[in-house]
Amino acid sequence: MNKNDLITAVAETSGLSKNDAAGAVEGVFEAITKSLSNGDEVRLVGFGTFSVARRKASTGRNPRTGEPMTIKASNQPKFKAGKGLKDAVN
């Protein structure tokens, strides 16, 4: 399923027009992105939790040359599935 498929599914399930469903889906994505960029978690009970994992700087190797290189510290978005989602999939 891609983004357009998701918008179509939301429109059919909710009875919204496709444009309204697209706005709703975009709004959800923007709200999650904004919360994560502020360092907050987004908990959707029964579905899962979006959070930010902080990765420390580390040393790696360039696969072409084999020489050591520094990998910068970064923040990575993370998702942990909730019980309801896990049960629905299994």
Image (cartoon, rainbow, N blue to C red):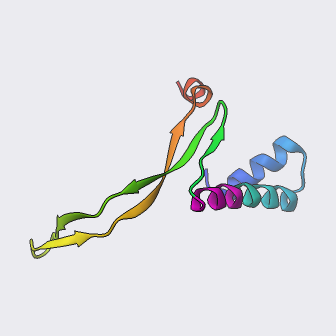
Q: Residue 64: image x %, image y %?
A: 14, 74
For residue 84, above or below residue 31: above
Q: Which residue corresponds to the image point at 68% horizontal and 57% vertical from the top-left?
A: 29
90 and 58: which is toward the camera: 58
Residue in view at x 9 percent, y 71 percent? 66
Left or right: 79, with 34 as reference point? left
Q: Is residue 84 above or below residue 79?
A: above
Q: Tell me which residue sits at (65%, 55%) in the image.
A: 32
Residue 71 in which image quadrant: bottom left
| Left or right: residue 66 compared with residue 89 | left
**The stretch drawn in magenta includes residue 77:** no
Name the residue at 77% across, 52% down: 8
Residue 65 locus on image (x, y percent): 10, 76
Residue 90, horizontal then vertical, whole percent: 52, 24
Total number of numbered discs in the rendering = 0
Compared to residue 38, the image places residue 1 above or below, namely above
Give residue 41's position: percent from left, percent from top. 59, 47
**Which portion, as a residue range, is magenta?**
29-38
30 part of magenta stretch:
yes
